[in-house]
Amino acid sequence: MDRRQFLVGLGGTTAVLAGCTGGADDPKESTESEGKYSELPEAEELLDQHYNALRDMAFASEEKFVNRDSTLTDRTIRRGDTGTLVKGNDVAPNINSDGKQRVWFTGNARISRETHRFNPTGITPPFTDRTVVTSLIELTTFERVDVSEDDERVFVFEGTEIDEEAEQESELNIRSIDVRIAVAESGYIRSMDAELTTATSSDADQTASSSYEYEVSEVGDVTVSAPAFVDDAVRIEGDLSEDRSAIVLQHAGGPTVAADTELVVQDNEGSTNPNHPNGLAFPTAFESGDEAYVYWTAANRAAISVGEEPSDVAREFAFPSDDRGRGIYLAEIGGPGPKRFSVRIDPQE
């Protein structure tokens, strides 16, 4: 979501979410945390530590966002030992009877009813809406407040003052802002509640409000299982060979990929052309348990070998030298609608 679009277009009423999070028994650790959280970290730093902490935790969370026309975005997450289940009305278009789409994250794969996306370096679930949280934090001047402690330790920050520099950069006329953030000692955002009111135009009295609510709960005590559709997905996994001469694909389960199924593959130096008569396709059926190799036969032409490593390749797969280049990507093509599987490989240190 574009940051300015978020700020201009929000509206609604927020509810206060309460909760406490865990503390340290070691006095030294508590002293270090006191110093670290004497003020709220910068937005990107806070969100980075939030994601890093949640990757190793079992937890449940709920996130609600209401924009200016009262449209609600509602997302819940349950993360356990077996994987992460994300349910939301904004996750994907295939909706359940409750109005929410289910997506299952395994650590390296994102699986919905239509698609299996794999990355050997990992796929992180959308633990929070980073754009919304970043915008609200950057627009607010915070002060730490004292709160009573329960079983777990939190550091609470409240802000009702507008950061004037951030407001000028956003070109908004903010009438009021009210944000409360509780941060756990281990680094994740335990809860966040916010309401932002802006003028609809620079010289009008009419205003619009936005609201955001987030809460992490059931820390360490969550059970979750994969949805039934996971077993029906075409689960194609992939990684580079050690010498980068090929993408090694594994059929990890689900339906057979038929012979002549077309793919597109790209790296930083080239890409196959799906419309070319010599495009990329499976020469034979690709079944559960099979292994296949995708390799370059020319600068922008590739082939697939099922069950046998290629003996001759035109070049290695190339990563970009910076963030502006193209990474390595492979996906099924053909027909309308979502593609059943894709593999993206990020640079590996």
Image: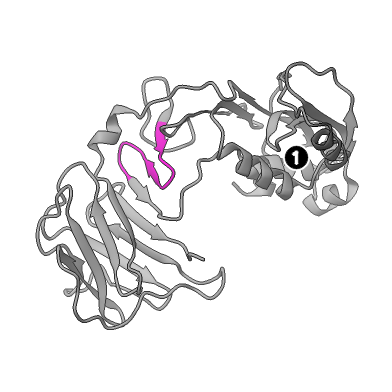
Residue 205, above or below 171:
above
Residue 53 makes an appearance in the image: yes
Residue 257: x percent and y percent? Answer: 16, 51
Circle 1: element type: helix
Magenta segment: 102-115
Callout 1: few (<14), some (14-19), or many (20+) C-alpha neighbours within 10 Å?
Answer: many
Query: Residue at horizontal 16%, vertical 74%?
Result: 277
Query: Residue at horizontal 73%, vertical 30%?
Result: 209
Query: Residue at horizontal 35%, vertical 74%?
Result: 243
User: Where, by quadrant of the figure, is residue 112 drawn?
Assistant: top left
Residue 216: x percent and y percent? Answer: 63, 26
Residue 22 horizontal side relative to residue 301, left or right = right
Q: 317 or 260, which lies in front?
A: 317
User: Where, by quadrant of the figure, is residue 193 drawn?
Assistant: top right
Residue 128 horizontal side relative to residue 84, left or right = right
What amino acid is labelled 1 in the image? Answer: Leu
Residue 152: x percent and y percent? Answer: 73, 22
By what rule are the colours in the image chosen? one colour
Query: Residue at horizontal 75%, vertical 39%?
Result: 136
Residue 183: x percent and y percent? Answer: 75, 32
Residue 74 horizontal side relative to residue 255, left or right = right
Q: Is residue 144 magenta?
A: no
Task: Report the label total.
Answer: 1
Q: 116 or 347, which lies in front?
A: 347
Residue 293, above or below 318:
above
Q: Is residue 109 magenta?
A: yes
Q: Which residue is mark 1?
A: 136
User: Where, by quadrant of the figure, is residue 63 drawn?
Assistant: top right
Q: 311 or 137, which lies in front?
A: 311
Residue 8 makes an appearance in the image: no
